[in-house]
Image (cartoon, helix red, strand yellow):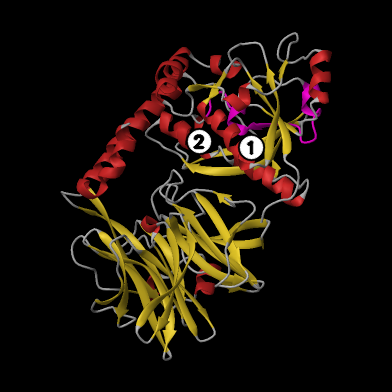
Amino acid sequence: MESTAAPLRFGVLTEGQSLPAWAAECVERLLASGQARLGARLQRPGGAPAAARRGAILPHLYHEHWVKRRSLALRQVELSERVAAAPLITIAGQGDATIEREALEKIRAARLDFILRFDARAVPEELLNLTRFGVWSFCQERRAVPCFRELVEGQAKTRMALERLTPGGAVCLHEGQFATCKASWVNNIDRARLGAADFCVRVCAQLANGGERRPVGSAETLVDAPPTNRDLARFLLRSATRSVEKLWELLFHVEIWNVGFTRQSVQQILRDGSVDHAQVTWCKPHGPGNFIADPFVYTRRGEPCVVVEDYFRGKGRICSVVPANAGASLELAVDLEFPYHMSYPCIFEEGDETYCIPETYQSRQVSLYRRTERGWELVRVLIEGKPAVDPTLFKHEGRYWLLFTLQDDGAWGNQKLYAYHAPALDSAWTAHALNPVKCDIGATRPAGNVFRSDGHLYRPSQDCSSTYGGAVIINRLLELSPTEFREEPAARIEPLAGGPYPHGFHTLNAMGSGAVFDSKKFAFDWFAWRQNHGRLHEVLR
């Protein structure tokens, strides 16, 4: 749904004729979105941000001479023509905490809706309430050194939040959680900084479509002492250890998934918060180097039919498991196979019709198939030009919904959730007003069909913060409309620690009165590097 509201006017605080690349990307995305236009460039006298000079000498030297030289996000780029051409207001005062009256009057005359700040320098208090929506900044600017404490403490996720600065503190407008790159401070900065470049667009879209909304909540309280030499030593040791572990994993281990059946219903799994090992039956393992995953279920002639991704000879295809509850043997019938990879055969049943939307991100299409006596037949392409990952179809309050991630989101399709909707399956599909509607490496990527329990709608998602498909997070949908999306975690389902596949869990679906799911293990393979070579560069960078 496109907003009819006039674009917001914003100003950007700059220092000279350049910005860090991540900040420049944020401004350019905002301008390209049409949600806002640049009303003024507020230039301050030069001076190194105070945060960059805090802490012991070794962390400072490492940041200045190693991290900054290698980080894509932190490299300085010249202001674009659009930014450089904006009306210039020079801010001067006695230090960063004050501003001259003349500059205040010029900013007031520019009629700005908000001001963007991309560094850690203090903002004069007079500036905080001078515009309609105040001064916006990112939470990592309040840290002594951005994106570092998560590495020292071994945290699985790095938080980025867009905040409104106020005299009493900061208020969170939008936030995202990114997987902490424990082997590299450079990669951790780039992942979080560049990944948050669309946050301003998201907040502007929300303001345009719903008026001035309540904030997400109060900003986190940061207890963040400047880094010490010991902190740097701890990080370097952790980084080296993690690099060796990751290299060992990628060079000599492959992921092997398998499908399991349980007598527990998805509602019971939700209530229990776990799968009961005693009630699980596993499919017979596939041949060496192959596996089955992503199980979905539909009913045909009164019997359950299970369709899965069959990863065979380096590429996925869609197959039926014969019989549906195979435990002693594994017999597969090929349903859909194309030259490109296929997986996640999402099933949607309505009336007497059964539909399937398989993941085919390499084709950059989301295609709808219908089950007939002749097999699966293409109905139509729903969305073109998107490398959609794990597209999940369901109906809610009279509208059809598609939720998916994008393979090119910077985290292999694990980071940001996109929503599309339509009044009918054969209608045009419309992007959600707030796309991407969610940014959380720990609870975004779809993990099975949306289901109802006790009057609420629940959406399974994957926790990919530590490993791909590490666990399933079942989210309770709180708001879903063309202009709203909000959910909260209701349960976390871990892989079965004592079972044959203890290292991951990433699909969960109902099957009659029970459920079907998949789990993974890491298996040793001398030639695993041939399959994992595309990810080695991230460790070696």
The reply to whether the C-beta atoms of the residues labelled 2 and 1 are less than 8 Å apart is: no
- Left or right: residue 376 versus residue 533 is right
**Which label sits on residue 162?**
1
Looking at the picture, tell me which residue is in the foreground, 392 or 377.
377
Q: Secondary structure at mark 1?
A: strand
Q: Residues within 10 Å of mark 1 (few under 14, many from 20)?
A: many
Vertical arrangement, residue 492 with respect to residue 516, above or below? above
- Left or right: residue 82 versus residue 324 is right
Residue in view at x 52 percent, y 54 percent = 443
Which residue is the site of mark 2?
194
Image spot of residue 139 (x, y percent)? 61, 33
Res. 419 image quadrant: bottom right
Q: Is residue 137 magenta?
A: yes
Identify the amino acid type marked 2.
Leu
The reply to whether residue 197 is in sight is yes
Image spot of residue 33 (x, y percent)? 62, 42
Specify the farthest residue to the top: 94
- Left or right: residue 435 versus residue 512 is right
Res. 226 image quadrant: top right
Vertical arrangement, residue 63 with respect to residue 305, above or below? above
The reply to whether residue 450 is in sight is no
Q: Which residues are magenta?
A: 125-146
**Which label sits on residue 473?**
none
Marks 2 and 1, the one that precedes in the sequence: 1
Q: Mark 2 and mark 1: span between their CA atoms?
A: 13 Å
